[in-house]
């Protein structure tokens, strides 16, 4: 086991090192330029489409809005609370600037993923729309590339049980035990039951729950964050100044903060940005492929909003609270740092983090169950669906009770491996993305 752990550590350091992070950012930059900055120019139009209510009900299983909420349910999670705090702890406040950069270019990546997911999706034997990297690799690049789609599906199936399942239930159990003294066994059982009740209904039930829960939880978390920000409003300008200056000059040691060079700000800002918004990993297009739409570009414009909402809005809220309260110099990291910051910011603020973490983790559990199930179906067919859901629910309870160092490491590696086939496909199919976008914009 020690040898395997050592190997996974080396793989993780490589995958989330400069080469892969440069590829993730590089593909985003390439697509942004190829699209002539369309994701930035059309962000308002994307929100207009999101709230227009347009849906072609015979063309998919859930509404375009529900597809985005399903994708956000899997994306908004521990990365927005613990991930932001870790980025600041390791890279200083400047890491937040590089998270923003990753998100701005990641919008084009997420757009391209959703365009291809809708364009190359299939209908399975149950009459359900299936799509995502494994399908646009197979149908867009041809049968000779099907092995690459198989690898994505394999990595996605394994990664789902880590990052989307046991890591999440473990985070909830730990948070509830620390703040409310709830027995992890009880947390595991309740979570497993709630998740089971949702996922047994398939993507329609997941879409319905996500469509209600995600907007409520996001608004509540943002509102709690704004209370802290307005309480320290006079320092907001200084906080942004610190973020920008630290991004290019590094951060000196202060309090319990050990200091960070510019490279650390870039590395951890990009890595945690990708971890939070998942642009380039290929997970979100699996949800967007189920949307009730006959136009890939329209769904792509809605999909790119997920990266904007996740990182530019929600992650920024967390970062500002951590910086404004001065908690970033405490020496704490992860969820503990966020909890400390919100607790210092307003009375009972620590409960904002705890409740936010619980709800974010729950929605991640249901969102990633769909991702993993679709990846497993690509490999094994529809017969795997019911056994997969049963194993998923059991894993939720298991994750709440065990130590997860190895599981987290394995999931981290598999998550990184997911990105490689997806980035290859995005690069090779980029002419298709550019063409359908140009055709759409010329007609509209």
Image (cartoon, rainbow, N blue to C red):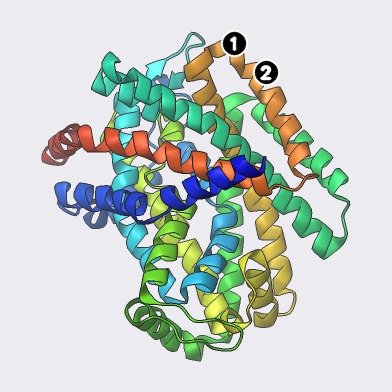
Q: Nearer the viewer, residue 282 or 198?
A: 282
Disc 1 is placed on an element classified as: helix
Q: At 34% across and 28% down in the image, what residue appears? A: 118
C-alpha span from label 2 to label 1: 8 Å
The percent coordinates of residue 73 (x first, y second) are 55, 45
Above or below for 203 versus 32: above
Q: Nearer the viewer, residue 407 or 190?
A: 407
- Is 200 on the left-hand or right-hand side of 120? right
Q: Position of residue 108 (x, y in %)?
A: 28, 48
Question: Do the CB atoms of the residues marked 2 and 1 lie less than 8 Å apart?
Answer: yes
Q: Position of residue 316 (x, y in %)?
A: 47, 68
Q: How many numbered discs, if any?
A: 2
**For mark 2, does the 10 Å Cα neighbourhood hold few (<14), some (14 to 19), or many (20 or more) residues?**
few
Based on the displayed image, in which of its 4 quarters is residue 321 positioned? Answer: bottom right
Q: Residue furthest left?
A: 442
Point 46% across, 26% down: residue: 153
Residue that carries the numbered disc 1 in the rendered image: 383
Q: Secondary structure at mark 2?
A: helix
Q: Is residue 56 visible?
A: no
Q: Is residue 344 visible?
A: yes
- Callout 1: 10 Å neighbours few (<14), some, many (20+)? few
Which residue in the protein does label 2 denote?
Answer: 387
On screen, residue 127 above or below 214: above
Q: Residue furthest bottom?
A: 234
- Please give the name of the residue rendered at 83% of the width and 58% of the height, measured from the top-left corner: 177
Residue 149 position by quadrant: top left
Q: Disc number at residue 191?
A: none
Q: Is residue 84 left or right of residue 267?
A: right
Quadrant for the N terminus, please: top right
């Amino acid at each position: 086991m020690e040898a395997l752990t050592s190997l996974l550590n080396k793989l993780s350091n490589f995958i989330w090192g400069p080469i892969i992070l440069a590829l993730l950012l590089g593909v985003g930059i390439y697509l942004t330029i190829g699209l002539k900055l369309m994701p930035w120019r059309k962000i308002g139009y994307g929100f207009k489409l999101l709230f227009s209510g347009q849906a072609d009900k015979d063309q998919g299983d859930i509404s375009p809005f529900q597809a985005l909420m399903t994708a956000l349910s899997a994306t908004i999670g521990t990365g927005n609370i613990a991930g932001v705090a870790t980025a600041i702890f390791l890279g200083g406040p400047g890491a937040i600037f590089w998270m923003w950069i990753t998100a701005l270019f990641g919008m084009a990546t997420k757009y391209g993923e959703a365009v291809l997911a809708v364009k190359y999706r299939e209908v399975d034997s149950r009459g359900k729309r299936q799509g995502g990297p494994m399908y646009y690799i197979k149908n867009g690049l041809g049968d000779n590339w099907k092995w690459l789609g198989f690898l994505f599906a394999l990595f996605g199936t394994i990664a789902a049980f880590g990052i989307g399942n046991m890591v999440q239930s473990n985070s909830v159990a730990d948070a509830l035990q620390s703040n409310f003294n709830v027995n992890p066994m009880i947390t595991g059982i309740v979570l497993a039951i709630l998740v089971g009740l949702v996922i047994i209904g398939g993507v329609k039930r997941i879409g319905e729950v996500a469509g209600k829960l995600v907007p409520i939880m996001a608004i509540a978390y943002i509102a709690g964050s704004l209370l802290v920000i307005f309480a320290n409003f006079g320092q907001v300008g200084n906080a942004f100044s610190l973020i920008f200056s630290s991004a290019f000059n590094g951060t000196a040691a202060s309090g319990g903060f050990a200091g960070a060079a510019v490279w650390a700000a870039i590395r951890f800002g990009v890595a945690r940005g990708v971890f939070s918004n998942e642009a380039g990993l290929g997970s979100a297009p699996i949800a967007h492929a189920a949307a009730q739409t006959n136009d890939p570009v329209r769904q792509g414009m809605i999909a790119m909003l997920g990266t904007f909402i996740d990182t530019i809005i929600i992650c920024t809220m967390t970062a500002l609270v951590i910086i404004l309260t001065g908690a970033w110099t405490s020496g704490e990291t992860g969820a503990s740092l966020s909890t400390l910051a919100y607790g210092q910011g307003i009375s009972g603020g620590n409960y904002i983090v705890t409740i936010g973490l619980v709800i974010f983790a729950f929605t991640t559990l249901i969102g990633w169950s769909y991702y993993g199930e679709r990846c497993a179906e690509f490999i094994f067919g529809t017969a795997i669906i019911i056994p997969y859901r049963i194993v998923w629910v059991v894993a939720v309870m298991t994750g709440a009770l065990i130590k997860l160092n190895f599981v987290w490491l394995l999931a981290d590696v598999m998550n990184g491996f997911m990105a490689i086939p997806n980035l290859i496909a995005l690069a090779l199919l980029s002419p298709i993305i550019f063409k359908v976008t140009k055709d759409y914009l010329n007609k509209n």
